[in-house]
Every structure is written in structure tokens, then in C-alpha cells.
């Protein structure tokens, strides 16, 4: 399947999906506190998504058993919520969620502090978020996809952290995962040219230590090999004639 250029109608639906997802994330951020379980977060996420009239796109996606990926500390992404895992003061937790509105997807992730966290963890969360913004400075028509990738990698590495290489961002639209892949490091070649109407999920995954990862026995949870902490930040964006539009942020919370 080639990279799709979205029509105005499709863009409107993705805007609505993104707005709903931004609100889901805002509401979930309010419940992050020591003592809650990762399953509490999933339950709340499911409820918020359904109340907004959307479907949770991750639920049953290739067998994934929950609506929200909840990844704590050295878990990079795709952590599976459970009743047994309680968040503790000092943890960092990334929440990744996807919604479908009238057949169109939005995908976004945020990493939160649980109570008071270390200086290094705070920096890790900030650098991860900022690397997304550094990346989208290059998300201009006529630039190439890997300009975004290189900007993310350079920013992260200039802070002494590393970007996960085995997992990438992606095109998004009527499917959660569409072409192209969006790496967070500079691969060989420049990648496709960016054109107005392309919609991308850009999602840096940043490790405090080495970039290498393992996948746990559950076949989902991705963890850092060296046990260092990892943060994730993601938004769905639209390439326009000018500056990119971030679809999965509400304007109240930039
Ligand atoms: N944001 C992630 C991604 O784009 C999460 C989806 S994985 C799922 O791959 F299986 F949980 F859906
Ligand atoms: Co994604």
C-alpha cells in the first residue's frame, strides 16, 4: 500500500478523533498517582473512549488485550495493564492510546511522573517530548521523511540519551498503521518526500541508557536491555502547505 493523501473529509474526521484522544489523555493524566494499578488506567481509558463515542483501536489489535498500553520505568512500550501492578512514587509511566472515530484513527502517547521523580527521569520525559517538537520542525512539504528522523535522533543524543531503533512511527488514517514507517533515527537514504495531506504518527521512544531492547515472554512488553528507564511521546500530525498541524492535541494544552 502506498502513502495516502487524505481528503478534506478524512482530515476533518482525523481532527475530531485527535481532539477526543487529546481529552482522553488529559483526563488520564489526572488519575496518575502512587497506588493506582495499571489496570485502573486501562479501565478509565476504555470508559473515556467509549463515552466519547469512539472505539479503542488497540483493543484486540493483533491480539493486544487492552485499550491503553501502560509502560512503567524500563518498559518502553506495549506494557499490558494488570491488577497486580501498582504505580509507586518515583516511577515514570507512559500511556499510549488510539481511538477510531467514524472509521478514522488517532494515536498518541504521553509519559507521566508518578509523584516526585528523580532529576534524570524528569529530564528524560522532557527531552523525549521536545524531540517530537524538534522532529516536526522538519515536517514541511518538500522536506524528506528522514529529515524528521534525523532531527529527533540528533536532539536526543545531544542530551546523552538514545533512541529505540527497532520500533518506529507510522502513517495513519483509516488504518492504525499505514505507510510510511517513521524511524526516530537517521536510516540510509532520505525517505519519501513530504506532501500536504499526509498524516503521520510520530513517536520517539527514548532510553536513558542504551537503545537496545528485549521483548518479554508475554510477546508484547518491550523493555530496555540495560534496565534503564524509557519514555515515549507521540502525536498524530498532518502535513500541510505550511507548518504541520498536530491533530492529537487540543489547543488548550500545547
Ligand atoms: N502506538 C503504538 C503503535 O503505533 C501502539 C499500538 S500497539 C497495540 O504501534 F497493539 F497495542 F495496538
Ligand atoms: Co503509534
Image: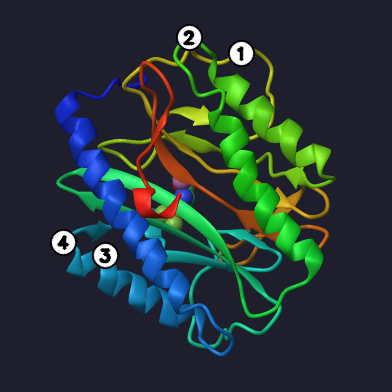
Q: Residue sitting at 46 percent across and 35 percent down? A: 170
- Image position of 1 with respect to 46: above or below: above
Q: Residue sitting at 56 percent across and 90 percent down? A: 35
Q: Would residue 184 be seen by someone viewing this image from the given angle?
A: yes
- Image position of 49 with respect to 3: above or below: below
Q: Are marks 3 and 4 in contact (CB under 8 Å)?
A: no
Q: Is residue 168 left or right of residue 29?
A: right
Q: Residue sitting at 55 percent across and 83 percent down? A: 33
User: Disc 3 and disc 4: Cα gap in Å?
Assistant: 7 Å
Please tell me the numbered disc located at residue 142. 2
Q: Circle 3 sits in a helix, a strand or a loop, which is it?
A: helix
- Image position of 104 with respect to 153: above or below: below
Q: Nearer the viewer, residue 138 or 103?
A: 138
Task: Please state which of the two labelled residues, at mark 2 or mark 1, is closer to the viewer.
Answer: 2
Dot 4 or dot 2, earlier in sequence: 4
- Quadrant location of the N terminus? top left
Q: Are marks 4 and 1 in contact (CB under 8 Å)?
A: no
Label 2 crowding class (10 Å Cα cut-off): few <14, some 14-19, many 20+? Answer: few
Please tell me the numbered disc located at residue 190. 1
Q: Which of 137 and 41 is in front in this view?
A: 137
Q: Are marks 3 and 2 in contact (CB under 8 Å)?
A: no
Residue assigned mark 4: 53
User: Disc 4 and disc 1: Cα gap in Å?
Assistant: 39 Å
- Rendering coords of residue 199 (x, y %): 36, 30
Please tell me the numbered disc located at residue 49. 3
Amino acid at each position: 500500500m502506498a502513502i495516502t493523501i487524505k481528503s478534506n473529509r478524512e482530515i476533518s474526521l482525523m481532527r475530531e478523533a485527535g481532539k477526543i484522544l487529546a481529552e482522553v489523555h488529559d483526563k488520564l493524566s489526572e488519575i496518575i498517582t502512587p497506588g493506582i494499578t495499571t489496570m485502573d488506567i486501562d479501565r478509565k481509558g476504555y470508559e473515556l473512549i467509549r463515552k466519547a463515542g469512539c472505539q479503542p483501536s488497540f483493543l484486540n489489535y493483533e491480539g493486544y488485550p487492552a485499550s491503553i498500553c501502560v509502560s512503567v520505568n524500563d518498559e518502553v512500550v506495549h506494557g499490558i495493564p494488570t491488577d497486580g501492578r501498582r504505580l509507586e512514587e518515583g516511577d515514570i509511566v507512559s500511556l499510549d492510546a488510539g481511538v477510531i472515530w467514524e472509521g478514522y484513527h488517532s494515536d498518541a502517547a504521553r509519559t507521566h511522573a508518578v509523584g516526585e521523580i528523580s532529576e534524570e527521569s524528569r529530564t528524560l520525559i522532557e527531552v523525549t517530548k521536545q524531540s517530537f517538537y524538534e522532529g516536526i520542525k522538519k515536517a514541511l512539504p518538500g522536506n524528506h521523511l528522514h529529515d524528521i528522523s534525523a532531527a529527533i535522533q540528533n536532539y536526543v543524543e545531544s542530551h546523552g540519551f538514545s533512541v529505540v531503533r527497532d520500533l518506529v512511527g507510522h502513517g495513519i488514517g483509516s488504518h492504525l498503521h499505514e505507510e510510511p514507517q517513521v524511524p526516530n533515527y537517521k536510516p540510509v537514504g532520505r525517505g519519501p518526500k513530504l506532501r500536504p495531506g499526509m498524516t503521520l504518527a510520530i513517536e520517539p521512544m527514548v532510553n536513558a541508557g542504551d537503545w537496545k531492547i528485549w521483548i518479554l515472554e508475554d510477546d508484547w512488553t518491550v523493555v530496555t536491555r540495560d534496565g534503564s528507564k524509557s519514555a515515549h511521546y507521540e502525536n498524530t500530525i498532518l502535513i500541510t502547505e505550511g507548518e504541520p498541524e498536530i491533530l492529537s492535541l487540543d489547543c488548550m494544552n500545547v
